[in-house]
Image (tube, helix red, strand yellow):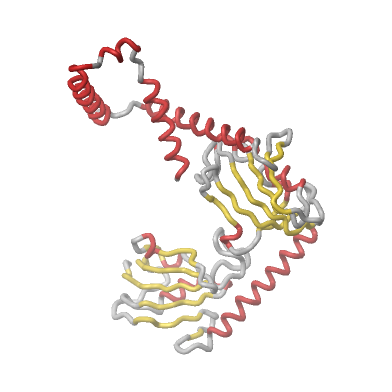
C-alpha cells in the first residue's frame, strides 16, 4: 500500500535529521587534507553501524516504538492534508471538520437520517490510492443514511438528488484510530466523490429491493433454460446442469468421500468469485460438506476428469446467498477432480 511506504519514508527522514548533531566548529574542522580521509572513515563507520543494526534483532519495545512513530507520522501527514485542502477554492468546512466541494448541483430532494439513498461513489486515500468504487462494481449502492460513517451521514444530508460532491472526511468522522477491515489504516483521511441518485423511504427501499430481487431471480432461471439447449449440456432431475470437458479414468467419489479438486467459480455474467487456480493450489474437502450441486455433480466424475457445472440457486446458496454470492444466483464452476482421497 502506498500509504505505508510514505509513512516509512517520512519516519526515515525525521530520524536522519534528528541524528545530525555536529556543531559548526566540528563541521569546519573537516576541511583541507583531512576531508577525504574523514569521509572514508565516516562511510565505513556508517556501513558498520548498518550491518550491526541489521544483525541485531529488534526488541518488542523497539518494535512498538517504531510502530508508534509510523502512526504519528501518518496521522500528522493526514492532518496536514486537511489543513491544506481547506484553503482550496470551493472547499467548505463544517463545524464538525467535514470538508466538501460541489462538483455538480442538482435540484432534487435532500435526505434525512431516516431515509435510504442510492449513490455512485469512489473512495480514495490522500495519495490518490483508490480503496472502493461503486463505478468499478458496475452498480450504485443503496443504504440507510443513518448507518454509515459520520462523515457520510452529515455530508449526504446536505446534498440534493442530482448533486455530485467531493467529501473530504477526517479520521474522527471516518474509521478513527482503529481503521477498518485491514483496508483503511487508523487515522486515515478519506476522500469520496459522491453522486446522489435517489432518496427513498424505508418502505420504498424495501419494495425496490424486492422488485430487483425478483428480476434477478427471473434472469437467472431464464439463463439456465437457455443454457440447457446448448450442445453437450446435460440436465439432471435435480436441475443441475453439466458439460464434460475431459473425461477421467480413475476412481469416482461417493457422497462422503474426501476429494481434492482444482476449480474456478463465476456468475452467469462471467464475474469470477473464487478460484483455486489463482491461489496456486487445489482444495481438499469432504464432498458432503459443500453445496448440493457440488455433492451431486462431483460424484459423476472420475479422477482426472474436468467438468463444467451450472448450478441453480436451490442447489447452491439459495434465497439468502452468501457474503460474495447474491441471493438466487446461478453459479458456474469448472471443476477438475485431482484425486479421491478416501
Q: Residue 326, percent across and down?
A: 59, 65
> Which image quarter: residue 13?
top left
Q: Is residue 243 left or right of residue 260?
A: right
Closer to us: 166 or 148:
166
> Which image quarter: residue 277?
bottom left
Q: Which residue corresponds to the image point at 66% horizontal and 57% vertical from the top-left? A: 120
Closer to us: 157 or 36:
36
Q: Which residue corresponds to the image point at 35% horizontal and 12% vertical from the top-left? A: 24
Q: Residue 79, percent across and down?
A: 58, 32
Closer to us: 135 or 269:
135
The correct choice, above or below, for 304 with respect to 137 in the image is below
Q: Residue 189, percent across and down?
A: 58, 39
Q: Is residue 225 left or right of residue 252?
A: right
Identify the residue at the far front of this view. Answer: 32
* Position of the C terminus by quadrant: bottom left
Q: Residue 81, percent across and down?
A: 57, 36
> Which image quarter: residue 330?
bottom right
Q: Is residue 33 left or right of residue 82?
A: left
Q: Which residue corresponds to the image point at 59% horizontal and 50% vertical from the top-left? A: 123
Amino acid at each position: 500500500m502506498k500509504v505505508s511506504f510514505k509513512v516509512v519514508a517520512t519516519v526515515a527522514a525525521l530520524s536522519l535529521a534528528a541524528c545530525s548533531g555536529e556543531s559548526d566548529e566540528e563541521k569546519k574542522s573537516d576541511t583541507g587534507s583531512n576531508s577525504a580521509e574523514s569521509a572514508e572513515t565516516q562511510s565505513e563507520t556508517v556501513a558498520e553501524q548498518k550491518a550491526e543494526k541489521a544483525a541485531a534483532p529488534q526488541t518488542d519495545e523497539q518494535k512498538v516504538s517504531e510502530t508508534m512513530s509510523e502512526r504519528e507520522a501518518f496521522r500528522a501527514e493526514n492532518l496536514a492534508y486537511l489543513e491544506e485542502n481547506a484553503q482550496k477554492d470551493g472547499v467548505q468546512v463544517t463545524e464538525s471538520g467535514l470538508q466538501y466541494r460541489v462538483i455538480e448541483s442538482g435540484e432534487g430532494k435532500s435526505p434525512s437520517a431516516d431515509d435510504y439513498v442510492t449513490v455512485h461513489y469512489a473512495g480514495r486515500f490522500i495519495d490518490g490510492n483508490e480503496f472502493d468504487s461503486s463505478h468499478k462494481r458496475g452498480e450504485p449502492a443503496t443504504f440507510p443514511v443513518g448507518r454509515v460513517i459520520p462523515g457520510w451521514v452529515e455530508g449526504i444530508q446536505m446534498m440534493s438528488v442530482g448533486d455530485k460532491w467531493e467529501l473530504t472526511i477526517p479520521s474522527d468522522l471516518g474509521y478513527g484510530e482503529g481503521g477498518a477491515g485491514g483496508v483503511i489504516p487508523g487515522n486515515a483521511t478519506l476522500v469520496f466523490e459522491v453522486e446522489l441518485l435517489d432518496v427513498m423511504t424505508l418502505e420504498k427501499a424495501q419494495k425496490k429491493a424486492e422488485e430487483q430481487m425478483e428480476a434477478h431471480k427471473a434472469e437467472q432461471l431464464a439463463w439456465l433454460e437457455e443454457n440447457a439447449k446448448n450442445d453437450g449440456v446435460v440436465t439432471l432431475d435435480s436441475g443441475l446442469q453439466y458439460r464434460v470437458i475431459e473425461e477421467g479414468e480413475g476412481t469416482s467419489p461417493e457422497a462422503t468421500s474426501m476429494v481434492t479438486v482444482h476449480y474456478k467459480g463465476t456468475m452467469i455474467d462471467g464475474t469470477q468469485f473464487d478460484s483455486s487456480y489463482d491461489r496456486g493450489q487445489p482444495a481438499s474437502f469432504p464432498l458432503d460438506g459443500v453445496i448440493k450441486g457440488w455433492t451431486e455433480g462431483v460424484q459423476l466424475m472420475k479422477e482426472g476428469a474436468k467438468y463444467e457445472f451450472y448450478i441453480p440457486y436451490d442447489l447452491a446458496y439459495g434465497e439468502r446467498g452468501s457474503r460474495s454470492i447474491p441471493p438466487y444466483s446461478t453459479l458456474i464452476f469448472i471443476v477438475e477432480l485431482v484425486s479421491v482421497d478416501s
